[in-house]
Amino acid sequence: MTVKVIGAGLAGSEAAYRLAELGVQVELYDIKPQSFTPAHKDKRFCELVCSNSLKGKDPFSNACGLLKEEMRVLGSLTMEAAAATEVPAGGALAVDRDKFAEYVTDKLLGHKNIKIVCKEITKIPDGYCIVATGPLTTDGLSESISAICGGQLHFYDASAPIVSRESIDFTKCFAGDRYGKGGDDYINCPLTREEYCALVEGLKTAERATLHSFEKGEIFEGCMPVEVMAARGPDSLRFAMLKPVGLKDENGNKYYAVLQLRKENAAGGAYNLVGFQTNLKFGEQKRVFSMIPALKNAEFLRYGVMHRNTFINSPQCLNADFSHRARPELFFAGQITGVEGYVESAASGILAAWHLYRRLCGKTTLIPPDTTVCGALSAYIAGENKNFQPMNANFGILPPPEKNIRDKKQRYEFLARRAIQNITEYKQKLNTY
């Protein structure tokens, strides 16, 4: 049995290597080195495009650091490559990009169970397959994916910031939907006229992130950034994402403007700033959005991003094992599934490979527990979500401790130790059952 893996980025490289290490014959397809996507330049695989940083290293204070530790337990090629090519970067794991890509490429080229095929795939093949083509999937394959996913394919990633529930000042907000409908799905953050005007001015003068040349002109047609909307007039936000109509607090008070926060996960540990898609630099997002009284001390679990992307509406199409609901032999991995970031993409590649391997062996599916970052991301991409957007690793997607731990440092350390123990137990089950 030969498994086809399409795409040799971080997710595809991880998937191909893990399957090969498990004894599966793999055909790894990529358009390199004959051609490149607009963002890629290196002929080698596993190219890091935007940054050489793989985010934080400490598993006890950084969720992405915890995810790296989980990946090491599961047998990660990219973490092995990162250890061999690391460069000094304080608390972050940064690598020499060229050496990193070279390390992974050599591992793939030298593996007896991997056949590299330089070819553009324009149609999803039959049989066992992992599609890991990333945010710049070529047009032909995008059409094929869109067809099999019922048209559920997005071509830009316009995400609003996400804050932790525990960092919201609930003395300066109230729960409830418009016109008294619903329960506490929305948290409403009111602003006075003066606070609103200050926020608008902050948005108009804040520094924006730079887009790639191939992204300009196509992204903002689909979703208007809050800072662009703010520049259109002093009241533009009050008729859009800060509309106060139909919102009253428990005492019947009305407000000049209201920002709504929406639950990002079932556990309610993370909240999305509704309508606040933005292209501001991360530091500017924290500065400007913290001007909202209820978010003065907000902890940002994920900042808003706007860039070209291709991702499936995974809750409509995928299972938690990254397989397609209508085609169980077809798996997806990487950013196309709705995980955000290098490390998260690589982790999904390992998971998809393990799940596919177990299916080949006739074994039951084992999803990592949601107390691990791997499990929480798996649950996120498959869970019911009408407003699905890509998600990165953060402590807000993990179930909270059974007993409340007020100190953030101690709480994160508890979550990390629990996750490491649980992923270790999970790996033992993968090998045993």
Image (cartoon, rainbow, N blue to C red):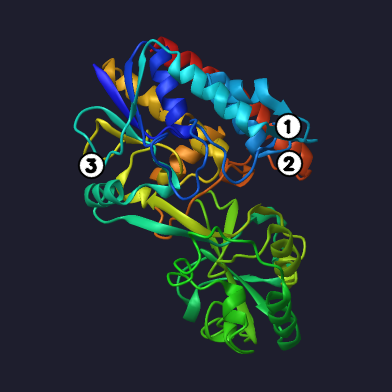
Examine the image and state in which quarter residue 326 appears: top left
Q: Position of residue 78 (x, y in %)?
A: 56, 26
Q: CA distance from mark 2 to mark 3?
A: 50 Å
Q: Residue furthest left?
A: 126
The amino acid sitting under disc 3 is Lys
Q: Which quarter of the image is occupied by the C terminus?
A: top left
**Residue 371 shows in the view:** no
Q: Which residue is mark 3?
A: 123
**415 sits left or right of 429 in the view:** right
Of residues 299 and 217, the one drawn nearer to the viewer in this rendering: 217
Determine the residue located farthest toward the front in the rendered image.
34
Amino acid under label 1? Answer: Asp
Q: Marks 1 and 3: which is nearer the front? A: 3
Residue 352, position as x, y percentages in the image: 39, 29
Q: Compute the Cα span from label 1 to label 3.
A: 41 Å
Of badges 2 and 3, nearer the viewer stands: 3
> Which circle's residue, 2 or 3, is located before the other in the chain?
3
Quadrant for residue 241, please give it: bottom right
Residue 273 x, y percent position in the rendering: 58, 65
In this rendering, would 247 be left or right of 308?
Answer: right
Q: Is residue 121 above or below residue 183?
A: above
- In this figure, which residue is indicated by the disc labeled 2? 405
**Residue labelled with disc 1:** 58
Does residue 44 appear left or right of residue 164 in this picture? left
Q: In the image, 382: left or right of 426?
A: left
Residue under the image location 33 percent in, 55 percent down: 153
First in sequence: mark 2 vs mark 1: 1
Q: Is residue 104 visible?
A: yes
Q: Residues within 10 Å of mark 3 (few under 14, many from 20)?
A: few
Which of the two residues, 406 or 192, is positioned nearer the viewer here? 192
Q: Tell me the amino acid under the disc marked 2.
A: Ile
